[in-house]
Amino acid sequence: MSGILVVDDEEGILTVLNRILELLMPGYDISTATNGLTAWQQLQQRSFDLLLTDQYMPGMTGLELAQQVRDKLPELPIVLMSGITDGHIEAEAQKLGLVGFLSKPFSVHQLRELLESILIPA
């Protein structure tokens, strides 16, 4: 089964994103992780079609997780989310080849458009 891994240290955001993604992407198994280390462990145990990660988390930032993923799983699409708009972070995300950046708070419409552009072939 196809899967999406969502990483955020805020449980409330994970719960909301999980429900939204279940509705928007019914053919996908949605998995969650509350930190980069747990996400990395999940990524080593099974394959995913998309990684959606928060930037600011204790222990490992979203960009640090993205760098690890790029080294081992270069084809995995990664989207970075952040509540803090920072041109440096967006530039680093582009350098790492991330497929998208979502500025929190974002709308369901913005999320759907991004997901469709990444996961649904044209």
Image: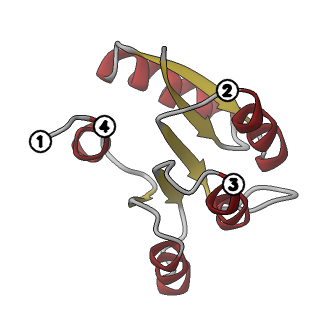
Question: Is residue 18 positioned above or below 114 on the image?
Answer: above
**In the rendered image, which residue does mark 4 sit on?**
119
The circle on residue 72 is 3
Q: Secondary structure at mark 4?
A: helix
Of labels 3 and 1, earlier in sequence is: 3
The residue at 23%/34% (across/down) is 120
As drawn, the label of residue 34 is: none
Q: What's the distance in space between the residues labelled 2 and 1, CA to CA?
A: 26 Å
**Direction from residue 30 to residue 112 in the image, left or right:** left
Distance Cα–Cα, label 2 vs label 4: 18 Å
Mark 3 residue type? Lys
**C-beta proximity under 8 Å, tags 4 and 1:** no
Q: CA distance from mark 4 to mark 1?
A: 9 Å
Per the rendering, the mark at residue 122 is 1
Q: Earlier in the sequence, mark 2 or mark 1?
A: 2
Marks 3 and 1 in Cβ contact (< 8 Å): no
The amino acid type of the residue labelled 1 equals Ala
Residue placed under numbered mark 2 in the picture: 46
State the image quarter where residue 68 is shown: bottom right
In percent of the image, x 81 and y 37: which residue is there? 41
Instruction: Tell me the SS state at disc 1.
Output: loop
Q: Amino acid at mark 4?
A: Leu
Q: Position of residue 50 (x, y in %)?
A: 48, 40
- 77 sits left or right of 44 in the view: left
Give the camera-side residue of 22 and 119. 119
Between discs 3 and 2, the one toward the N terminus: 2
Dot 2 amino acid type: Arg
Residue at image location 65% in from the left, 41% down from the top: 7
**Image coords of residue 78 (percent x, y):** 50, 53
Question: Image point 49% across, 30% down: which residue?
Answer: 17
- In which quadrant of the rendered view does residue 23 lie? top left
